[in-house]
Image (cartoon, grey):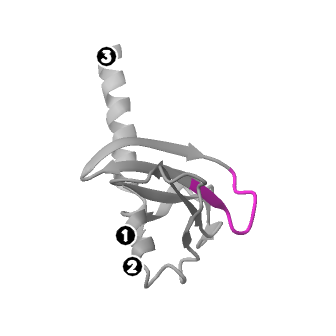
Amino acid sequence: MFKNILKSSFLVFCGGSMADGLPENTEVTRENAESLSVKLAKIDSGSADTSLYQLEFANKLGNCLAGRVQTYLLLGKNEISGSSMDYKVGSEQPSVLLHMPASGYDMAVTVQYCCSEGMSPGCKQSISISSVNGIVSQ
């Protein structure tokens, strides 16, 4: 009996998650970066072996606050590592520094915007950069 209740609870939870779905994503390009308040610049890392980028993004998208930054280190088409950080935005133009090896690596980034209002709070919108090197070098 307990097992069936647990399964039912799991299905209800998953169903609710699936109904809301993933955040609505907008891919950042050089053409739309300014309208999304996204700035990406390569800056001096002090070492030829390390690439360093500064990513600035809007603290709000619609009525939702920036609340999660996810980064993915890429080597070719393979993801080498990834990280996700939840935080409270402390400025009008938040930014993150992205460090990676200089040779052959790339990075993808997603910023999720989270709402705390309504019937189903959570991260509803996101912007993503599929290639940091691609955006900077265009």
Name which residue type carries label 1.
Answer: Gly
Q: Which residues are magenta?
A: 88-97
Location of mark 3 (residue):
3
Q: Is residue 21 magenta?
A: no
CB contact under 8 Å: marks 1 and 2: yes
x, y percent for residue 65: 63, 62
Location of mark 1 (residue):
134
In front of the other: 83 or 89: 83
Location of mark 2 (residue):
138
Cα–Cα gap, marks 3 and 1: 50 Å
x, y percent for residue 85: 56, 45
Q: Quadrant of the N terminus?
A: top left
CB contact under 8 Å: marks 3 and 1: no
**Residue 120 at least partly seen:** no
Q: Quadrant of the C terminus?
A: bottom left
In front of the other: 89 or 46: 46
- What type of secondary structure mainly makes up the magenta span? loop
Q: Secondary structure at mark 3?
A: helix
Q: Secondary structure at mark 2?
A: loop
Mark 2 surroundings: few (<14), some (14-19) or many (≥20) residues within 10 A: few
Mark 3 vs mark 2: in front: 2
Name which residue type carries label 3.
Answer: Lys
